Image (spheres, rainbow, N blue to C red):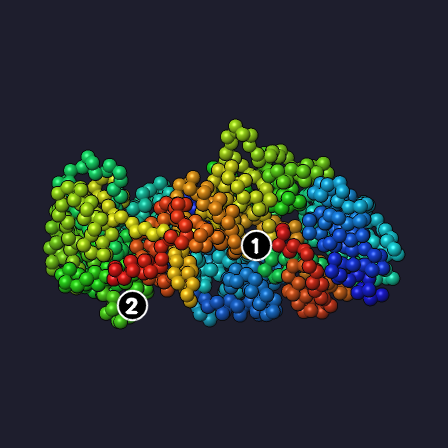
């Protein structure tokens, strides 16, 4: 069958008419399949939600018990039939619990990658290439300028700065789900064993990651009792990026602003945000990883969802691969 | 190159002066010779390297890359060197490995024109992304990392635990890659001995008159001079070599051929560089904005020289002929200086006149109402003071005229850096004027100091509670005739500006007081500021 008949973009998100379900819908629907727990993909208020156990747990942590009507945990690699459509979840390597969703009917297979990355991440399972007719890819970093360096080089910069500026508080902006825990885990891998202080917004998710067996070492809340005078000099503090421009950050002595994101590849981005030490750590593919993934999977068609679609579509054209942008709205291609 | 590249990356994003000095000093301590010397030269602007045109870099890239993909990338990044450094992919099989900065520069310096293309291509293939960026900035000429030669010298002083004046004195006698300098700073060798006598000598600076500073001092021990509003310079003619330096030791000879040509005496003098006529020709001294026309130029046109004639108002003499007269007292030096100026070209040199006074009160009155608009205050010099480098408290004082003040309305605020990164602490303010019949605020300046921590809390709260628009890190705040925030802005002077919409630019503006008692409609008008400029010229 034609891939367009199996899955197509509708106002509420990618829709499978035969199976009567949406994938990562941006508005409430009766039945939603969710790739991962980031809030632009996993929204509250759907009737039935199918996702990995971890993604369901994360949604519950973020939205509370009533985040949907009914939920069903899907095991990775297990085949499920939804109204005659074969559905399977495969690891995507993006954050804990993240999955690609493979949808197949009448011999045509489409893989919706969700957000994904290819490099090693101590906090989640690695991406698994799945052969398919149509590969739906994100393009958050879909420009040839994005070549993310090795994580260890980036962590080394941070450790050097801690030695060079031992009197300053090293405050790292990192998204609460995935990035924050990965930064902590990477620091631990590099042998940093001092306590790491976190913003309250990270507490529940860090606890959850730990419960899932991710080693985060000693974590303390970056809070002060009313009579306490601690200046956090020389410590590492992690919080959501917005918190650092907030009054919350005033408790730290001479803070050194750090941001862990793939966007930090671009100097002007770092400068605009007032970041002094950019750490290029991304939970998305960089350009070589996007193009290598497409080559490796070898789909007959590529659909590009969100990010910088035009460059990736152009690259596919040059490679002789049929490609088109899906123009889905509602996904936050800046949130990284 | 990698260590240098990392240094540049950090410097670009580090706003604090002391943090920059630490980053530089740490680099100078750890990088080997000659790399650190070439890095210093690149930062201080003393590196001579035939530059490569951006068009060639673009060509090299398009040999390998689809033009459409390049265009998307360039549009996104906005800077050619950065775009190329990011998108460049070495051919399969070429492994990146670091090229020492010194090797890269020496290779470029010895490469003939015909081979430049292939040498540059080869380096781009071998370097990693960050090093590639540093390399491209070097070869296209223009690091733009917010570090002055002065700051680099400060970092050298920090590295070696020396006084910066020692480095300034040596500076013009040394050349890249400065190995003897670094070996001395690292404690591995003796202080370099210059083959030619040093031409720049660190200047003597004054401390501001603080509360009560003069109470214990006898006016009879001091001479007073006007503090002229030009730029402080040192002019040397030693063994026939003539040089003009700014007070931090940057050579500015190229911009003032008229003054250099007229310097037919032998010695080194200290003075104020000004534009206009000397007292000896009975023509008026012109304002700082006129002097600005002559600054920062590599060459000067005939027309420039005629319209903006430069001269030096002499303050002091360091060397009379080949004799170091700095240990002499102020009065003895002044006698020598007076002789020297007497014999020099009357169009290009005059002697800074002494201001007679008998009490501090009298001097205070003179300071507040100086006889010439190009005077910005009074200098006090102990009669017996030798000429010593740096800013010691006691021998010389500066006593500035009171600043100008206007009431302006807060228009935009930007978040600060470092300690202030969670505060809106950089403020743009405006005054009223009529545009197309409507009362409108036009920005006239920006200030990020002058207020206390408690006042900053108040300003920050106002900004957060009254934001009307956001542009990245900048917020526009409510500024209406009957609602807004009035601040009293103090500043040292006004220049005409073509860059600012208001047509005026303030010098050294700061927020003197918060005027919560005033409504924006009571703030000053642009016409008031314009009149201040008119009265000066």
Q: CA distance from mark 1 to mark 2?
A: 42 Å
Tell me residue B196's x, y (percent): 25, 54
Q: Position of residue B261 (x, y in %)?
A: 21, 65
Residue A142 in view in this figure: yes
Chain letter of disc 1 in the image: A
Q: Do tag 1 and tag 2 residues touch (Cβ < 8 Å)? A: no
**Helix, strand or loop at mark 1:** helix
Left of B467 or right of it: where is B390? left
- The mark found on residue B300 in the picture is 2
Disc 2 is attached to a residue of which chain?
B
Residue located 31% across and 43% down the image = B163
- From this viewpoint, which residue is outermost toward the top? A227
| Quarter of image, res B362 | top left
Q: Which residue is mark 1?
A: A265
On residue B461, the disc is none
Tell me, yes or no, if residue B198 can be seen here: no
Residue B281 falls in image quadrant:
bottom left
Q: Eyeballing the image, is B309 above or below A218?
A: below
Front-most of residues B507 and B81:
B507
């Amino acid at each position: 069958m034609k891939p367009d008949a199996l899955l197509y973009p509708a106002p509420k998100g990618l829709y499978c008419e035969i199976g009567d379900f949406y994938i990562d819908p941006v508005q409430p629907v009766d039945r939603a399949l969710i790739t991962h727990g980031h809030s632009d993909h996993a929204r509250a208020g759907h009737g039935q939600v199918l996702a990995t156990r971890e993604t369901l747990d994360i949604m519950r942590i973020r939205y509370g018990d009533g985040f949907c009507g009914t939920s069903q945990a899907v095991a990775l690699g297990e085949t499920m039939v939804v109204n005659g459509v074969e559905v399977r979840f495969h690891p995507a390597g993006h954050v804990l619990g993240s999955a690609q969703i493979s949808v197949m009917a009448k011999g045509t297979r489409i893989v919706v990658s969700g957000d994904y990355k290819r490099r090693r991440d101590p906090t989640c399972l690695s991406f698994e290439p799945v052969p398919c007719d149509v590969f739906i890819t994100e393009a958050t970093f879909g420009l040839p300028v994005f070549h993310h360096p090795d994580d260890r080089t980036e962590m080394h910069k941070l450790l050097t700065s801690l030695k060079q500026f031992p009197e300053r508080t090293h405050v790292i902006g990192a998204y609460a789900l995935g990035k924050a825990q990965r930064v902590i885990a990477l620091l631990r891998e590099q042998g940093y064993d001092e306590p790491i202080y976190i913003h309250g917004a990270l507490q529940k998710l860090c606890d959850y990651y730990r419960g899932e067996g991710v080693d985060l070492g000693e974590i303390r809340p970056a809070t002060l009792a009313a009579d306490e005078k601690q200046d956090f000099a020389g410590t590492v503090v992690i919080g959501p990026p917005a918190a650092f421009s907030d009054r919350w950050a005033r408790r730290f002595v001479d803070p050194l602003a750090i941001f862990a994101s793939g966007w930090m590849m671009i100097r002007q981005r770092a400068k605009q945000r007032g970041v002094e030490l950019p750490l290029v750590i991304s939970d998305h593919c960089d350009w070589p990883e996007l193009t290598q993934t497409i080559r490796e999977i070898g789909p007959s068609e590529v659909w590009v969802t969100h990010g910088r679609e035009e460059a990736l579509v152009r690259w596919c054209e040059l490679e002789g691969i049929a490609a088109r942008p899906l123009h889905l709205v509602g996904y936050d291609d800046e949130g990284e | 190159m990698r260590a240098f590249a990392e240094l540049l990356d950090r410097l670009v994003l580090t706003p604090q002066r002391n943090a920059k000095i630490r980053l530089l000093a740490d680099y100078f301590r750890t990088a080997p010779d000659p790399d650190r010397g070439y890095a210093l030269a690149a930062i201080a602007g003393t590196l001579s390297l035939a530059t490569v045109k951006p068009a060639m870099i673009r060509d090299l890239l398009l040999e390998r890359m689809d033009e459409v993909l390049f265009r998307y990338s360039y549009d996104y990044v906005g800077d050619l060197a950065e775009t190329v450094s990011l998108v460049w992919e070495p051919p399969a099989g070429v492994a990146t490995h670091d090229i020492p900065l010194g090797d890269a520069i020496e290779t470029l310096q010895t490469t003939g024109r015909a081979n430049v293309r292939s040498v540059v291509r080869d380096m781009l293939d071998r370097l990693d992304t960050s090093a590639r960026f540093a390399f491209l900035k070097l070869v296209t000429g223009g690091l733009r990392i917010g570090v002055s030669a002065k700051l680099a010298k400060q970092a050298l002083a920090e590295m070696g635990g020396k006084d910066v004046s020692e480095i300034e004195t040596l500076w013009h006698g040394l050349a890249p890659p400065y190995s003897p300098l670094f070996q001395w700073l690292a404690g591995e060798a003796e202080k370099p001995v210059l083959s030619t006598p040093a031409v720049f000598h660190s200047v003597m600076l004054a401390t501001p008159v603080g509360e009560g500073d003069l109470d214990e001092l006898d006016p009879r021990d001091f001479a007073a001079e006007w503090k002229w509003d030009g730029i402080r310079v040192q002019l040397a003619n030693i063994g026939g070599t003539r040089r003009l330096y700014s007070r931090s030791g940057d050579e500015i000879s190229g911009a003032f051929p008229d003054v250099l040509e007229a310097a037919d005496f032998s010695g080194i003098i200290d003075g104020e560089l000004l534009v206009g006529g000397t007292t000896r020709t009975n023509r008026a001294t012109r304002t700082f904005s006129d002097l600005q026309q002559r600054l920062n130029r590599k060459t000067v046109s005939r027309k420039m020289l005629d319209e903006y004639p430069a001269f030096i108002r002499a303050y002091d003499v360091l060397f009379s002929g080949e004799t170091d007269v700095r240990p002499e007292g102020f009065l003895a030096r002044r006698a020598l200086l007076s002789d020297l100026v007497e014999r020099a070209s009357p169009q290009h040199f005059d002697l800074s006149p002494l201001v007679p006074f008998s009490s501090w009160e009298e001097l205070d009155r003179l300071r507040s109402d100086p006889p010439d608009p190009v005077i910005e205050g009074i200098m006090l010099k102990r009669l017996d003071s030798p000429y010593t480098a740096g800013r010691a408290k006691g021998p010389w004082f500066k006593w500035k005229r009171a600043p100008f003040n206007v009431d302006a309305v807060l228009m935009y605020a930007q978040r600060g850096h470092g300690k202030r990164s969670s505060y809106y602490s950089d403020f743009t303010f405006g005054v009223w004027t009529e545009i197309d019949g409507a009362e409108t605020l036009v920005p006239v300046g920006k200030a990020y100091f002058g207020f206390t921590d408690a006042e900053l809390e108040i300003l920050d709260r106002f900004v957060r509670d009254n934001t009307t628009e956001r542009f990245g890190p900048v917020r526009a705040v409510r500024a209406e005739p009957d609602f807004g925030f009035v601040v009293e802005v103090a500043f040292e002077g006004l220049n005409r500006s073509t860059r600012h919409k208001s047509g005026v630019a303030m010098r050294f503006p700061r927020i003197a007081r918060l005027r919560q008692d005033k409504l924006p409609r009571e703030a000053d008008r642009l016409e008031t500021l314009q009149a201040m400029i008119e009265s000066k010229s």
